[in-house]
Image (spheres, grey):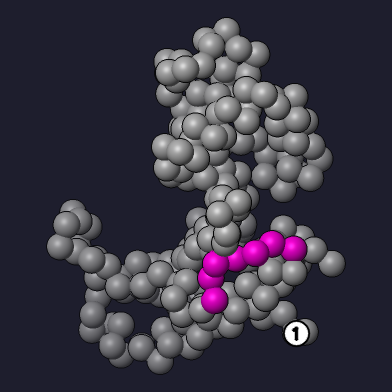
């Protein structure tokens, strides 16, 4: 199957709208937006198909996965009418699967995040309990070559105190204190249009 890529023209559109973030410019250049949007839809569709070969995703529609470019300015101090980025999330399906994936495509700030950015209280407790009983495996996985070469160290905010119900002197207390558990991979503008940059992370051969 031919793998769709994020085109250089899509990044160019995002650069242009960042410099001309107003409705008049957008209306005059809407065709470029529609072409960039279609490129993202095609990329997401390919991604969902490839990832479902080794994972199970809840997402079925690229159009529903891609976030709107239009800003909701009612409750924001930022009154620019458009987001100068394309971003989307992919959620894992089923009761036994947790976490998900988020891709932000923006010139100068493109990145992949995966894991738990805002886990609900039940999932947060479940993760912490799993770390308590399996901390050696957690550290082994986080320090593995596959994780370190693609993502580096675990990211996420942590509480300063010991979470209720956990021992403050536990070997893995620094990991238990996390309230977010996610990995992040940054992409340069030159890497974004390259298929292999996503292929090596998102799907398996």
From the image, give the main secondary structure of the stretch colored magenta: loop
Q: Residue at x 61, y 36 (%)?
A: 154
Q: Quadrant of residue 21?
A: bottom left
Q: Quadrant of residue 174?
A: top right
Residue 64 image offset from top left, x and y in percent:
44, 76
Count residues near mark 1 (Cα–Cα under 10 Å), then give few for <14, some for 14-19, many for 20+.
few
Q: Residue at x 60, y 12 (%)?
A: 170
Residue 117 image offset from top left, x and y in percent:
47, 45
Q: Nearer the viewer, residue 68 or 128?
A: 128
On screen, residue 112 versus residue 30, left or right, reads right
Quick check: 190 above or below 143? Answer: below
Q: Quadrant of the C terminus?
A: bottom right
Q: Residue at x 46, y 27 (%)?
A: 158
Outermost residue, left side: 74
Whether residue 150 can be seen here: yes
Q: Circle 1 is placed at which residue position?
A: 2
Residue 145 image offset from top left, x and y in percent:
81, 40
Whether residue 111 can be seen here: no
Q: Quadrant of the N terminus?
A: bottom right
Q: Nearer the viewer, residue 57 or 95?
A: 95
Please provide the residue range marked out in magenta.
54-60
The answer to whether residue 198 is magenta is no
The answer to whether residue 57 is magenta is yes
On screen, residue 92 versus residue 70, left or right, reads right
Instruction: Say which element carries label 1.
Output: loop
Q: Quadrant of residue 134?
A: top right
Q: Residue at x 52, y 45 (%)?
A: 116
Residue 156 image offset from top left, x and y in percent:
50, 36
């Amino acid at each position: 199957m031919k793998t769709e890529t994020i085109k250089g023209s899509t990044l160019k559109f995002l650069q242009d709208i960042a410099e001309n973030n107003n409705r008049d410019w957008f209306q005059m250049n809407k065709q470029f937006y529609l072409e960039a949007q279609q490129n993202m839809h095609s990329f997401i569709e390919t991604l969902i198909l490839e990832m479902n070969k080794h994972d199970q995703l809840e997402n079925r529609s690229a159009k529903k996965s891609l976030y709107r470019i239009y800003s909701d300015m009612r409750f924001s101090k930022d009154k620019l009418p458009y987001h100068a980025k394309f971003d989307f999330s992919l959620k894992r399906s089923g009761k036994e699967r947790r976490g998900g994936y988020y891709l932000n495509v923006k010139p100068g700030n493109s990145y992949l995040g995966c894991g738990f950015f805002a886990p609900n209280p039940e999932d947060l407790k479940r993760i912490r309990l799993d770390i308590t009983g399996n901390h050696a495996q957690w550290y082994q996985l986080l320090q593995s070559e596959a994780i370190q070469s693609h993502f580096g160290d675990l990211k996420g905010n942590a509480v300063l105190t010991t979470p209720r119900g956990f021992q403050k002197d536990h070997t893995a207390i620094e990991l238990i204190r996390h309230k977010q558990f996610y990995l992040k991979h940054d992409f340069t503008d030159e890497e974004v249009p390259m298929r292999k940059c996503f292929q090596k992370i998102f799907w398996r051969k």
